[in-house]
Amino acid sequence: MALKSWYDVIKPRSDLRQGHVPEASEFAVHLDQVRDGRALDEYTNPEMFFKRTYLTKNLTRFAAEALRRLSGEKVETNAVFHMITQFGGGKTHALTLLYHLGAYGPQSHQWQGVSRIMQEAGVSAVPQTQTAVFVGTEFDPLHGRGGDDGTPKRLTPWGEIAYRLGGEAGFAAVAEHDRERIAPGGDVIRKFLPPDQPCLILMDEVLHYIARTRKMEAHRDMIDQFYYFLQSFSEQVRAMDRAV
């Protein structure tokens, strides 16, 4: 029996069939741009994103494990994922997938592939989460973010994450630590982590942030403080029932 042509088995997208080769930038996703609605529709529109995402076995397992943890399941789940891939390995794409699931919760049930993730996770619903995004290539280690746009001035990753999770009230818990660029301890971190809602924290391009922070002569210990924060923050997230 003759094999079918690959063209008949997997039909290329319409733009490829018409001879329009996409620019390389179309395949590069930036998580902060997705959050702010500045990315291409293929990434900001969650239904379109899932329709164009091929759920590999590893991606499905990753999303399912995170979904189980966000649903309160602690057996065979991790709260902290350390993702290491080569350039173009799909790390940010995977984080974007989690972002859309957490941001839209039950609304995601109708998207292509989500039922498969839910089945793998053994859950009946996708929980809506309180979500924070930190992207190291965008957050400036010297000037921070905010202060001139009606939001509090955030100088550190912990200030940014606290604000994204809890707004001005969340930021107030670490305002002094942010101003002094001193990593908060667990007692303070718990004050801005939502106690009664699933919590999703997505950090991307962290090494870029660390590399640029090395040049800050006035704050030479900032790298150490950042490491201290990551350690304390990870421990607090692990102790929560519905946090990733």
Image (cartoon, rainbow, N blue to C red):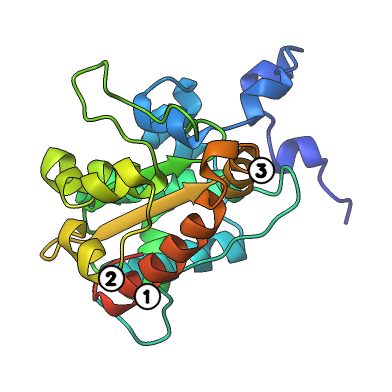
Q: Earlier in the sequence, mark 1 or mark 2?
A: 2
Q: CA distance from mark 1 to mark 3?
A: 24 Å
The residue under label 2 is 186
Residue 232 screen position, x and y as percent: 38, 70
Of all residues, the one furthest to the bottom in this rendering is: 75
Mark 3 and mark 1 in contact (Cβ < 8 Å)?
A: no
Q: Amino acid at mark 2?
A: Gly
Q: Earlier in the sequence, mark 1 or mark 3?
A: 3
Q: CA distance from mark 2 to mark 3?
A: 26 Å
Q: On screen, 212 above or below 39?
A: below
Residue 211, numbered label: 3
Q: Neighbour class for label 2 at 10 Å: few (<14), some, many (≥20)? A: some
- Check disc 2 and report its element: helix, strand or loop: helix
Q: Is residue 184 visible?
A: yes
Which residue is label 1 attached to?
235
- Residue at the spot 47% in from the left edge and 33% down from the top edge: 139
Apparent side of residue 48 relative to residue 7 in the rendered image (left or right): left
Please name the amino acid that badge 1 sits on: Glu
Q: Is residue 116 left or right of residue 199?
A: right
In terms of secondary structure, where does tag 3 sit? helix
